[in-house]
Image (tube, grey):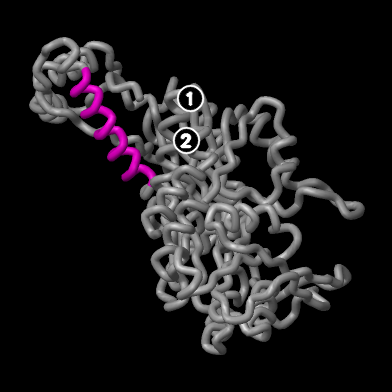
């Protein structure tokens, strides 16, 4: 990170993305402070200069090269008092999101972002009320409302003269509309073209539903993060994943589409892999746990008397997962634990899973905070894995043009967990 002028990084939050952005900014500040302290330590030793003198030199040079204007004399005086200490960058940019009566939306950028690398946060699945119109309106926004706020924010920061734009989208919008089955569009690709035409440089997302979406882009870079490390960390807190004699454990792929994901968990946890094969009636649309399009389920493997772990990228209505859980319990599974990177829980899913939990169909569900929930976190059966520090580290590295390879391939981190638990 540029320790002299760190404010060249700017965080702009859409209404739905503000909660997650605030979590990430907290980690960004911590990372900055740690890196700054390490930098000062090395320079102090290398040039035999005291840390205090180095910090004064940093601040002096920052003042000389800064074009920031101070509106009040008192503010300037207060700033000068801190010349012998470090000040953590704010990162956050003030905005005013407006929702008009006819459904149109607008975003105004209140701070200067000219020449800055802007990271725009948006959680399109956020179903909690968003504060709009200078606090005069609180409204639950639809996915399409969130998406429109994202597009107008991109346009606003572009017109405000930013240097680079990176989107932070924990859930990539319309990612399930990535292939054609008939006379329909490729909406995931369509949105990708929108982002690229608006000058987006990078997109950071979590466990995108299909890697085919990456083929949409010719210049924009898509960074697809994986929450496996954070999920396994939480898994190790609720079940013994190292003692097969005491607690037999098996990984089960909930369907053929999730085989690679669960094969990864099986290999890293050194556990056997089984699979559920579901036959679907595609003339029907899954509505909830009672009305899904699954016609039959077959199990390839043995789950009797074992703790079962299933991992999937996304949970919407959850009907297919509840059917799978019921089937596994009917096949004598001991405890069923599911991990979901993107816990959408649409419709009546929370109530349906509460009912399934009371029936004893599963033990725990591990989800991430990539999607904001309030009442879900209060459920006994739900465990939230925090991925905000992960996103913060990726953002810092992208901003500094550093490699993120060892963050995308996190097997070395997972080995640290399994080794410590053994």
Highlighted range, magenta: 24-42
- Residue 79 in the image: state x and y as whole percent: 15, 27
Residue 16 is left or right of residue 72, and the answer is right
The residue that appears at 68% across and 29% down in the rendered structure is 197
Quadrant of res 109: top left
The residue that appears at 51% across and 25% down in the rendered structure is 164
Residue 175 is left or right of residue 166, and the answer is right
Q: CA distance from mark 2 to mark 1?
A: 10 Å
Question: Which residue is most to the bottom?
Answer: 359
- Residue 73 in the image: state x and y as whole percent: 14, 25
Residues 42 and 119: in front is: 42
Residue on which disc 1 sits: 162
Q: Residues within 10 Å of mark 2 (few under 14, many from 20)?
A: many
Residue on which disc 2 sits: 119
What secondary structure is the stretch in magenta mostly built from? helix
The residue that appears at 35% across and 25% down in the rendered structure is 1
Residue 250 is left or right of residue 327, and the answer is left
Point out the tag, 2 or 1, that comes first from the N-terminus. Answer: 2
């Amino acid at each position: 990170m540029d320790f002299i002028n760190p404010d060249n990084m700017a965080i702009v939050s859409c209404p739905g993305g503000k909660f997650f952005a605030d979590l990430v900014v907290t980690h960004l500040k911590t990372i900055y402070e740690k890196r700054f302290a390490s930098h000062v330590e090395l320079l102090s030793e290398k040039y035999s200069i005291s840390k205090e003198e180095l910090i004064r030199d940093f601040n002096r040079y920052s003042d000389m090269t800064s074009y920031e204007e101070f509106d009040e004399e008192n503010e300037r005086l207060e700033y000068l008092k801190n010349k012998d200490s470090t000040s953590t960058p704010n990162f956050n940019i003030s905005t005013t999101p407006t929702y008009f009566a006819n459904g149109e939306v607008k975003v105004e950028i209140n701070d200067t972002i000219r020449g800055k690398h802007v990271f725009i946060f948006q959680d399109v699945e956020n179903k909690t009320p968003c504060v709009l119109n200078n606090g005069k309106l609180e409204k639950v926004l639809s996915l399409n409302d969130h998406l429109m706020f994202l597009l107008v924010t991109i346009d606003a920061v572009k017109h405000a003269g930013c240097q680079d734009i990176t989107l932070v989208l924990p859930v990539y919008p319309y990612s399930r509309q990535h292939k054609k089955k008939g006379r329909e569009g490729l909406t995931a690709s369509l949105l990708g073209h929108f982002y690229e035409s608006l000058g987006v440089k990078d997109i950071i997302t979590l466990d995108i539903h299909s890697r085919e979406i990456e083929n949409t882009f010719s210049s924009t870079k898509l960074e697809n993060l994986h929450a496996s490390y954070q999920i396994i960390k939480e898994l190790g807190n609720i079940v013994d994943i190292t003692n097969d004699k005491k607690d037999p454990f098996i990984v089960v792929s909930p369907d053929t589409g999730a085989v690679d994901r669960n094969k990864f968990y099986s290999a890293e946890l050194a556990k056997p892999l089984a699979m559920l094969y579901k036959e679907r009636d595609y003339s029907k649309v899954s509505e909830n746990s009672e009305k899904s399009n699954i016609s039959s389920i077959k199990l390839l493997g043995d789950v009797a008397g074992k703790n079962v772990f299933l991992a999937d990228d996304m949970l919407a209505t959850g009907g297919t997962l509840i059917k799978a859980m019921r089937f596994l319990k009917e096949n004598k599974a001991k405890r069923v634990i599911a991990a979901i990177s993107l816990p959408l829980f649409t419709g009546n899913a929370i109530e349906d899973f509460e009912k399934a939990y009371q029936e004893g169909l599963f033990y725990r569900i591990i989800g991430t905070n990539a999607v904001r929930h309030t009442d879900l976190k209060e459920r006994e059966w739900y465990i939230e894995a925090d991925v905000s520090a992960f996103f913060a580290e990726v953002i810092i590295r992208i901003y500094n043009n550093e490699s993120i390879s060892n963050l995308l391939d996190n097997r070395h981190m997972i080995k640290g967990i399994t080794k410590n638990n053994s």
